[in-house]
Image: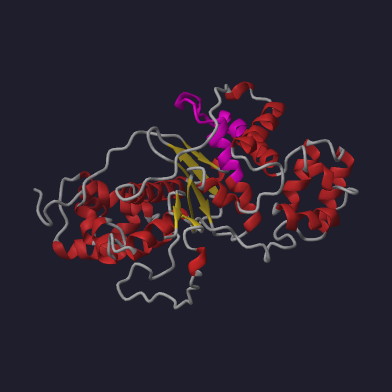
Amino acid sequence: MNLGQTNFNGDKLKEAREARGITASGLSDLLEISRQSISLYEKGEQNPKIEVLENISNILKLPKHFFISPTESEEHALIFYRSLSRTNQTERKASEQKLKWFKNIIKYLQNYFEFIPINLPNYDLDFKSITPNQIETIAEETRKFWNIGNGAISNLTVLAENNGIIINRGEFNSTCIDAFSEWRKNFVPIIVQSSDKNCAVRSRFDLAHEIGHLVLHRNLNEKDFTLTNLKLLEKQANYFGGAFMLPASSFPTDFYYPSLDIFRTLKEKWKMAIGAMINRAENLNILNKNQVQRMWINYSKRGWRGNEPLDDIIEPEEPQFIKRCFETLINNKIQSRQDIGANLPYDLRDIEILSNLPEGYLRNDYKESISILPKIKKELTGDVQIFDINGTKKTIL
């Protein structure tokens, strides 16, 4: 018998539970109801009573209308995880449900904005036969494709966003998930990064690694997505990350002699981990095996395995595009904060986290910080160029 809250969607209960990293047994304990009841709710064979739905909403921190919203149909896509073998099933399910929410936020914003066109090179590659030399060439060509030269990249996140990649950086509450990416057919490429370790250089390499997947593995078939092949795919993306961030044509010219102190100096310029630079120097044959071994021994002796010098000084890069979309909606009175909360069936804090908005931004009582706005001289108006959110030039009149 199907009694209780009408229009309740059991699929959404399972989605919410997995997004919060809670098992069915764990949820039954929190709700103080039977495990069988949770199973019946999720299968659509029984609806929870109004008071039970209220408790579900409070415990899972989602509005009640989330649980009566329709199930979205999605085309299957491959998700590339950093260190998949270390990622447990509960953490993967939680991250994938949050990715689903992020994609729904993107779809909502696409009703109002023309997103930056996707600008990534397309290679017809057989991943099983890709060589390090090929990856070196592809990394160099990707830089040329983006017209950025061979110097240090000041902000990789902005660079990726300006080429149509959508990025989310937030907390996973996981020690195993660093980043993952997905490029679904007829949708935007997405990279999700963990901010848990709050290490700028590590996040930059994670981002370069995921860009490597988007460039090298965009045409991969699902049948090739095996654990054995994943190790090779990860190795290739790692190699791309190093080659892209530390180009063979420019990085070696910074060396005076091989030492950890030189790498420490170069870290501030290239914004790359000392460990990543040691690996890159080895790949480029700048260091021989004995030198590399001594480097790692001294690296450990200095206690850099956990935290390197400058890790607390170099600021992490924050995604801007999705955040600016919401700011534009609200500042131009296209959608109010109340409209956003009504149209997206998630907790406001979830939307803020997924969109890199400050905490409380979507609350109706949010107070903008007061700032002084400079006034442009009249004689300069008409000559000054600004860009809108889509990167289109606008002339100030």
Q: Looking at the image, which residue sits at the far front?
A: 379
The answer to whether any part of residue 10 appears in the image is yes
Closest to the observer, 385 or 201: 385
Q: Classify residue 39 as left or right of residue 322.
A: left
Q: Residue at x 34, y 67 (%)?
A: 362
Q: Is residue 224 magenta?
A: yes
Q: Residue at x 37, y 34 (%)?
A: 186
Q: Is residue 227 above or below residue 259?
A: above
Closest to the observer, 40 or 93: 93
Closest to the observer, 53 or 160: 160
Indicate the position of residue 79 as horizontal and vertical percent values: 47, 38
Q: Is residue 129 above or below residue 266?
A: above
Q: Which residues are magenta?
A: 208-233
- The colour mode here is secondary structure
Q: Classify residue 211 as left or right of residue 134.
A: left
Indicate the position of residue 351 as horizontal and vertical percent values: 36, 59
Q: Is residue 7 magenta?
A: no
Look at the image and tell me in which quarter the C terminus lies.
Answer: bottom left
Q: Classify residue 333 as left or right of residue 284.
A: left
Count the labels in the image. 0
Indicate the position of residue 153 as horizontal and vertical percent values: 66, 49
Q: Is residue 371 above or below residue 237?
A: below
Residue 241 lies in what quarter of the image? top right
Majority SS type along the magenta span:
helix
